[in-house]
Amino acid sequence: MLKVFIIGAGPGDPDLITVKGAKLIEECPIVFYTGSLVPKAVIQRAKKTAKILDSSGMTLDEIMDVFEYAKEKNLNVARVHTGDPLIYGSTAEQMRRLDTLQIDWEVIPGVSSFSAAASAIRQELTLPEISQSIVLTRVEGRTPMPSGEKLSEFVKTGSTFAFYLSIGLINKLVDELNTIFKHIHPFFFVYKSSWPDQKIIMGI
């Protein structure tokens, strides 16, 4: 029975994929991945007879065409996403479409970039009497933030913040944080966490 496995490839280091995710890439006859983000070493685990497809530049309809082809041929699919597919992974619409097509699917969680970034800076993100919560968020851009999720509201909690998808809006983020915070707070920029060309910038 056909199944689509939505696999988190991890943040970059090909060894940071889960054992289950790696085994499914090795076993599935169709391996479908985001070529602009997923390291080639992750996909090289696939068997030589596997059909390897790069989804970079494809529309959602074209992606679903691949799943429909797999359904016709009764072939399992390893759909490989960067990081953890359930955190800013743009997978919800795929899941809905798979349900509509009556194609079974399963998500294999992956190591998210915020965990890899914390490892890179050698910092625990939750410390007693300092912060016991982590806010994963992003800067508001073309996609508006829901009501109640404004940065000015979040900071009242005193939580640790991890910003995704925000480097292109860094000036906006800095301006907003400077307006909100009245005291010195440490911060880190982690570029391509766990990749060979990883870069870290620390500031206060």
Image (cartoon, helix red, strand yellow):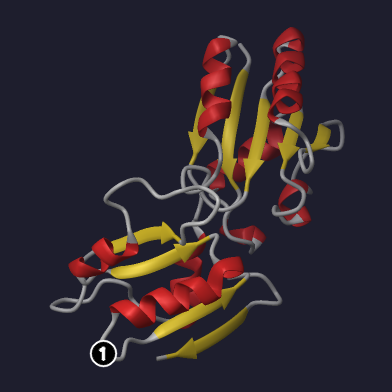
Task: State how many labels appear.
Answer: 1
Instruction: Give x and y (percent) for residue 108.
Output: 51, 39
Quarter where residue 15 is shown:
bottom right
Q: Secondary structure at mark 1?
A: loop
Q: Is residue 144 above or below residue 118?
A: above
Q: Residue at x 58, y 14 (%)?
A: 103
Q: Residue at x 58, y 40 (%)?
A: 7
Residue 104 seen in this snapshot: no
- Give whichever of 118, 185 is nearer the camera: 185
Instruction: Give x and y (percent) for residue 156.
Output: 19, 68
Q: Is residue 156 left or right of residue 73?
A: left
Question: Considering the image in quadrants, where does the C terminus appear?
Answer: bottom left
Instruction: Give x and y (percent) for residue 140.
Output: 46, 57
Q: Is residue 134 above or below residue 95?
A: below
- Give whichever of 81, 56 is nearer the camera: 56
Q: Is residue 199 left or right of residue 132?
A: right
Q: Residue at x 46, y 62 (%)?
A: 139
| Crowd class of label 1 (few under 14; some 14 to 19; many from 20; radius 10 Å) | few
Q: Residue furthest right?
A: 48
Q: Is residue 78 above or below residue 179?
A: above
Quarter where residue 50 is shown:
top right
Instruction: Give x and y (percent) for residue 124.
Output: 33, 76
Question: Considering the image in quadrants, where does the N terminus appear?
Answer: top right
Q: Which residue is mark 1?
A: 183
- Give whichever of 160, 146 is nearer the camera: 146
Q: Amino acid at mark 1?
A: His
Residue 129 seen in this snapshot: yes
Q: Residue at x 58, y 27 (%)?
A: 94
